[in-house]
Image: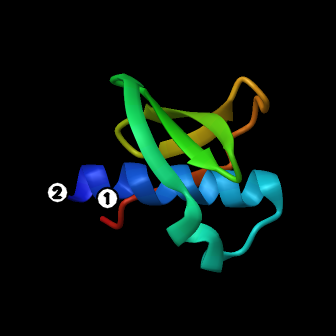
């Protein structure tokens, strides 16, 4: 479903932005587990990264937790 795709894509994108990687790196980032309903764990370059997700009625965000306080990616659905 689109929610799972969103979580995988934005989680990987947050890691790419944090590490200075490229979209080519998407295939090298591995989903490892859902820690809870708002946190997923990914592995990239032999390091584990916690990605935190937040949603409101109009905005969805994914960011590296706890390394950064500002969202690395924000997405708004089209009307």
Neighbour class for label 1 at 10 Å: few (<14), some, many (≥20)? Answer: few
Q: Compared with residue 60, is residue 52 higher up or lower down, i.e. above or below?
A: above
Q: Answer with the quarter of the image where residue 29 lies.
A: bottom right
Name the residue carrying label 1. Answer: 5
Residue occupying the far bottom of the picture:
24
Which residue corresponds to the image point at 51% horizontal and 70% vertical from the top-left?
27
Residue 28 at x, y percent in the picture: 57, 65
Neighbour class for label 2 at 10 Å: few (<14), some, many (≥20)? Answer: few
Which residue corresponds to the image point at 63% horizontal and 39% vertical from the top-left?
63
Name the residue carrying label 2. Answer: 1
Residue 18 at x, y percent in the picture: 78, 51
The quarter in which the N terminus is drawn is bottom left
Q: Decide if residue 24 is on the left or right side of residue 11.
A: right
Distance of label 1 from label 2 (alpha carbons): 6 Å
Residue 59 showing in the rendered view: no
Which residue corresponds to the image point at 37% horizontal and 56% vertical from the top-left?
6
């Amino acid at each position: 479903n689109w929610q799972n795709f969103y979580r995988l894509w934005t989680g990987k994108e947050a890691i790419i932005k944090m590490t200075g990687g490229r979209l080519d790196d998407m295939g090298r980032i591995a989903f490892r587990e859902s820690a809870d309903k708002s946190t997923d764990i990914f592995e990239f370059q032999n390091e584990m990264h916690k990605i935190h997700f937040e949603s409101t009625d109009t905005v969805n965000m994914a960011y590296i937790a706890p390394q950064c306080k500002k969202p690395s990616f924000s997405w708004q659905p089209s009307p």
